[in-house]
Amino acid sequence: MSHMNYEAKMAGEYDRLGYAGEEPGRGRRRWWIIGGLIALVVLVAAFFAFGSGAKKPDAKAEAAAKANNSQIPSVTVAVPGRQTIERVITGTGTLAAKRDMPVGIAGEGGMVTRVLVEPGVWVRKGQVLATVDRSVQAQTAQSLEAQIKVAQADANIAQSDLVRAQQLVGRGFISKADVERKVATRDAAVARVRVAQAQYAETRARNGRLDIRAPEAGLILTRSIEPGQIVSSGSGVLFRMAMNGEMEMRVQLSEADLQRVRVGTPAQVTPIGSSQPFAGHVWQTSPVIDPQTRQGVARVQLAYDPALRPGGFASARIGAGGTVAPQLPQSAVQSDEQGNFVYILDAKDQAVRRPVTTGEVSDAGIAITSGLEGTERVVMTAGAFLTPGQKVIPILQKSR
């Protein structure tokens, strides 16, 4: 009875739902299929609703991040550190002999017979540079030499007479007065010999001064004499020479730079038209300043070299000590009405203006005497396009 009642209830339920005439098993399967389809539709809708919606905000954020990064400039930065920077003073000037020695006539002069040296020749002290005709002076010397012989012969005779007179005075044949007269005659003859000898020596000395000789060892620079030329003490300079061949450069420096130069300071001299520097050192600084140009002269001693020609123009680099400081390229240092400054980066990669004081400027860069410790990240380039507080993307430059 109960089983029949259940089937009757199910049949009535089917009739109410509009499935009359269908079997109960087939209806149940249809419900399962419909339920599965509904579940599938819900899952698909949820996937598109939540999955695609989550991706779109991520894509937008990424696009926004890319846009922001594209607007942030990239700059090259470096940590300069601290290094020893040599202070160099530069100047120009002329080359010259350190000791320029003029050579002229020391004697009475005459006609030049021979010139024995040319410019650029090394000579020793006392070497004959040119000879002057001495034919007349030679005859005078021979005459004086003959007078010496005559005076010596008279002195010998006077001495012999004196000896004989001294032998006879003891026997009473000659008086003492006669002996005294013979002594005086002998002394006068000896004196005449000495006078003749002195005159002869003087003539020889004069003849020796007819030759033009080098007063010191050195290098002949110029020659202003030719054979056949008549020269005298008023002829002026006939040769110029550099004593010991030593050269120098006379560097024109400002009053401030001259104060920083000391005797013994090393220097490099480069003649105009040459790329080869020559080493030297400052051996003298000018004790006075030209009131018109406000400049003084530092004299740099140089060893002889054919490339160093007196009268030539040259440039000099003189060392003036060194300082320990950061050094930056010129592109890193900016300037405006407030003075010199650089940009450094803070911890947030934002540009920070930093006032600095510059020092020595050279091919290697600019020394920063104050304002930087050397541990900062300094903007090397593009500093002119930055503003304080601007965020940047740093590109660290490797130290050299």
Image: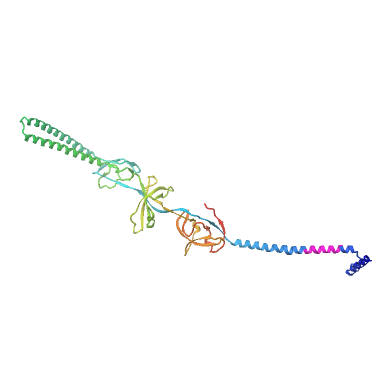
Residue drawn at (56%, 56%) of the image: 395
Percent of width and height locating residue 82: 48, 54
Range of magenta residues:
29-42
Horizontal relation, residue 269 to residue 236: left or right: right
Residue drawn at (86%, 63%) of the image: 30
Image vertical order of residue 8 relative to residue 88, above or below? below
**Furthest residue toward front:** 2
Camera sees residue 5: yes
Residue drawn at (46%, 53%) of the image: 84
Image vertical order of residue 103 relative to residue 184, above or below? below
- Most prominent secondary structure in the magenta stretch? helix
Horizontal relation, residue 61 to residue 97: left or right: right
Percent of width and height locating residue 71: 59, 62
Image vertical order of residue 391 relative to residue 117, above or below? below
Count of picture labels: 0
Q: Foreground residue, 15 or 252?
A: 15
Indicate yes or no whether the magenta region holds residue 388. no
Camera sees residue 253: no
Percent of width and height locating residue 303: 38, 45
